[in-house]
Image (cartoon, rainbow, N blue to C red):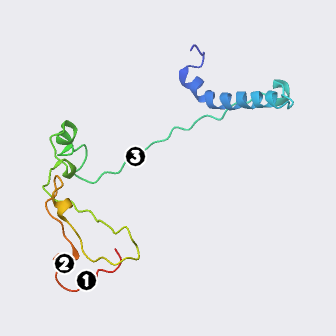
């Protein structure tokens, strides 16, 4: 874009110009009187102030690369989710009858299922059966 004042000056005026254009289009869309330039005067946007952003760093840590950065980005570092841990999983099997009384439990079908290592019932746990609500 060729602007006699330069690209930086042009960019500084863009936000105000876009807002002004938006209000002109909104006035036209809702039938509100559009103001002429003579009534408005020449709107000169305020100049933008240049700021500075300073980060405080602890002494001795300026521009220090993280030791594990290369391993993290190349995939050489192993996370705990990447580690296969041999373990067992358990599932609760609940009764179909909420008010019934269990007289016996047949675990033979469960033991014959693929991948089942064992079945634990209340009889396998020593002591009083006082687990409460499960």
- The span from disc 2 to disc 1 (Cα, nearest Å) is 9 Å
Q: Which mark is residue 54?
A: 3
Disc 2 + disc 1, Cβ < 8 Å = no
Q: Around disc 2, counting alpha carbons within 10 Å, would you say few (fewer than 14), some (14 to 19), or many (20 or more)?
A: few
Q: For marks 2 and 3, give the one nearer the viewer.
A: 2
- The span from disc 2 to disc 3 (Cα, nearest Å) is 68 Å
Q: Between residues 59 and 93, which one lies in front from this camera angle?
A: 93
In the rendered view of the protein, which quadrant contains the C terminus?
A: bottom left
Q: Is residue 60 left or right of residue 39?
A: left
At 23% from the left edge and 86% from the top edge, which residue is drawn?
Answer: 128
Which is nearer the N-term, disc 1 or disc 3? 3
Which type of secondary structure does the marked residue at label 1 adopt?
A: loop
At 79% from the left edge and 28% from the top edge, which residue is drawn?
Answer: 29
**In the rendered image of this protein, does residue 75 appear above or below residue 109?**
above
Which type of secondary structure does the marked residue at label 2 adopt?
A: helix
Q: For marks 2 and 1, give the one nearer the viewer.
A: 2
Q: Position of residue 84 (x, y in %)?
A: 15, 50
Q: Between residues 24 and 63, which one lies in front from this camera angle?
A: 24
**In the rendered image of this protein, does residue 78 appear above or below residue 2?**
below
- The span from disc 1 to disc 3 (Cα, nearest Å) is 65 Å
Q: Quadrant of residue 77?
A: top left
Q: Between residues 39 and 104, which one lies in front from this camera angle?
A: 104
Q: Quadrant of residue 40?
A: top right
Q: Which mark is residue 129?
A: 1
Q: Position of residue 4 (x, y in %)?
A: 60, 15
Q: Which residue is mark 2?
A: 123
């Amino acid at each position: 874009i060729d602007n006699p004042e330069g690209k930086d000056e042009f960019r500084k005026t863009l936000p105000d110009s876009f807002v002004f254009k938006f209000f002109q289009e909104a006035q036209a869309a809702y039938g509100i009187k559009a103001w002429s330039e003579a009534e408005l005067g020449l709107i000169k946007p305020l100049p933008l102030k240049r700021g500075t952003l300073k980060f405080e760093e602890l002494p001795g840590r300026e521009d220090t690369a993280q030791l594990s950065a290369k391993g993290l980005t190349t995939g050489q570092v192993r996370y705990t989710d990447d580690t296969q841990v041999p373990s067992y999983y358990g599932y609760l099997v609940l009764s179909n009858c909420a008010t019934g009384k269990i007289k016996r439990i047949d675990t033979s079908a469960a033991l014959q299922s693929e991948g089942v290592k064992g079945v634990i019932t209340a009889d396998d746990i020593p002591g009083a059966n006082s687990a409460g609500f499960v």
